[in-house]
């Protein structure tokens, strides 16, 4: 049984400035993405604009506070994401180790498994546990 993993590529000072990767880095990323597609691993993915284009919405005790970007803690920001479907976290790690560097200097990728219906079974009513048809998502966004 496969699991879905969110692949979170953390922002760097360069990505927050809006600096695009070099043509060579783009080409390496294209080759890597093609490998993911051929292997049937890639579900979705996209790069994100710098946080100066973002908004942060915080809820506290019924109040809602909206803050416009940019945000200062670059290491906590996300530059891109993808969703992979793999057999387990070891396979996700193996793919992540092949991720091409997009900029000089350190970079970070976080791998987070999705909550799946099986993880929520004791809190979901039996009628909600039915497996959705191919291509559909259940009420909880899980297949």
Image (cartoon, rainbow, N blue to C red):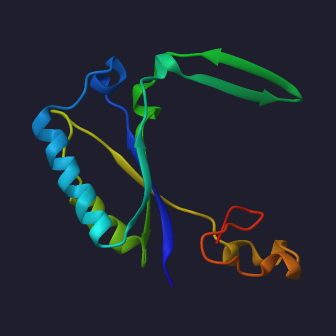
Q: Residue furthest bottom?
A: 1
Q: Is residue 27 above or below residue 91?
A: above
From the viewer's side, name the closer residue of 82 and 56.
82
Report which quarter residue 121 is drawn in: bottom right
Left or right of 102 on screen, residue 140:
right
Q: Position of residue 36 (x, y in %)?
A: 30, 64
Q: Residue furthest left?
A: 24
Q: Is residue 114 above or below residue 109?
A: below
Task: State the residue at coordinates (21%, 32%).
Answer: 21
Report which quarter residue 106 is drawn in: top left
Q: Is residue 53 above or below residue 135?
A: above
Left or right of 23 on screen, residue 47:
right
Q: Position of residue 17 (x, y in %)?
A: 32, 17
- From where the camera sits, is residue 71 visible? no
- From where the camera sits, is residue 48 visible? yes
Position of the C terminus by quadrant: bottom right
Q: Position of residue 35 (x, y in %)?
A: 23, 64
């Amino acid at each position: 049984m496969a699991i879905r993993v969110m692949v979170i590529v953390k922002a760097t000072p360069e990505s927050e400035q809006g600096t695009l990767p070099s043509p060579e880095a783009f080409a390496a990323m294209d080759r890597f993405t093609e490998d993911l597609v051929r292997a049937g691993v890639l579900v979705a993915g996209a790069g994100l604009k710098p946080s100066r284009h973002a908004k942060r919405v915080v809820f506290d005790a019924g109040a809602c506070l909206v803050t416009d970007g940019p945000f200062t803690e670059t290491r906590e920001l996300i530059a891109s994401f993808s969703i992979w479907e793999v057999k387990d976290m070891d396979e996700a790690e193996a793919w992540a180790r092949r991720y091409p560097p997009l900029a000089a200097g350190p970079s970070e990728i976080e791998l987070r498994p999705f909550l799946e219906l099986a993880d929520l079974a004791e809190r979901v009513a039996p009628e909600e546990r039915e497996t959705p048809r191919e291509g559909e998502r259940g009420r909880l966004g899980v297949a």
